[in-house]
Each structure stands twice: as C-alpha cells, then as structure tokens.
Image (cartoon, rainbow, N blue to C red):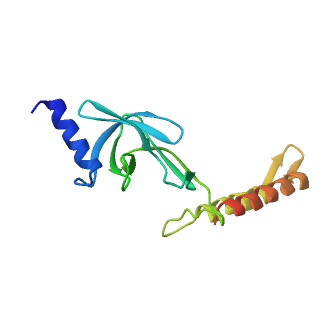
Amino acid sequence: MSEQQEIRRKLDALQKGLVQHLPVKVKKVETETCTVEYEGLEVYDVLLRAAKNGKSTKYLIKPTVGSDVMISRVLHSKRFYVDMFSEIDEVEILAKKGVSIKTEKASLLDVIAELIQEMQNAIITTPAGAGSVSPTTISKLKVIENKLKQVLK
C-alpha cells in the first residue's frame, strides 16, 4: 500500500468512526473553519465551532497556524471538527450572563475593579501640590467598570 493510500485509509477510518481522534497540523485558519494537514494530505473546512441545524454555537477557538490539533469526525457526517488544541490564537465567547476568568486566588473582574478604584482614588502630584482625579474622569471610570461587570463575572 502506498503512503498516499495509507493516509486515505486512516482518514476513511476516522470518517467511519473507527478512529476517535487524528493528530494533524494547522495549515490555514478561516472565520469558522481551518485547513489541516495529515502526512501530506490536506483536509479542508474543519469546523472550529460546533453548529446545530446550521446555527453556530456561542464560542469559537482559533488555533495558531502551524500548531498541532486533534480532529474528530462529526457523527453521521463527512465533516470534521477540532477538539484539542496545542496553541490558540483567539477565543471568542458569547455568554448570556458573562464570562468568569478566575484562578484559585483572584478573578479578572476583581483585579480590574481594584485597578479602577485605585485610579479613582489616585493622588496626582502637581507643582501646586497634591490633586485628585477629576469628577468627569471618575464618572467615566465608573461607566467602564459597569460595562466590565456586564461582560465579566
């Protein structure tokens, strides 16, 4: 069996569900799909987000071109999707209630809120002496903080 036939056999096995995941290299990233390469054979239109009844899901992960990913077959379909990433360029999440980014010690929202509070309370040194942040700036910082609270949880 030639190398090209062996590659096609492996891709056919993946399409038939005989193989769960296939390691591939990302060649090109589009809006919601990518092109990957497996041992010299390119696979086009590999999904980067789930779709149900033609509607895209609310999250998208874009891998780095040249990185390694794992692809799997969409059940009862000839389409593939990326299910594991070694490097990520971009993550897009659309959430109804916001996104929570946390570690065991801090959340991104808390850290940004602290930063905004410190900016509002800043003492500005001028030749005339100590000053403070203008009420207009404080008001704008509060608007920014409220917007962040709508996005981050």
Q: Residue at x 75, y 55 (%)?
A: 119
Compared to 11, does 151 lie above or below?
A: below
Q: Nearer the viewer, residue 119 or 47?
A: 47
The image quadrant where one finds the C terminus is: bottom right
Percent position of residue 32, x then y: 51, 42
Percent position of residue 104, x then y: 48, 70
Compared to 12, does 136 lie above or below?
A: below
Image label count: 0
Percent position of residue 120, x then y: 79, 58
Residue sitting at the far front: 76
Q: Residue at x 28, y 52 (%)?
A: 21
- Decide if residue 88 is on the left or right side of residue 1: right
Residue sitting at the far bottom: 104
Q: Dividing the picture into quarters, in which one does residue 121 lie?
A: bottom right
- Decide if residue 46 is on the left or right side of residue 142: left
The image quadrant where one finds the N terminus is: top left
Q: Nearer the viewer, residue 31 or 128?
A: 31
- Decide if residue 142 is on the left or right side of residue 153: right
Q: Dividing the picture into quarters, in which one does residue 64 lie?
A: top left
Q: Residue at x 12, y 30 (%)?
A: 2
Residue sitting at the far left: 1
Percent position of residue 142, x then y: 81, 59
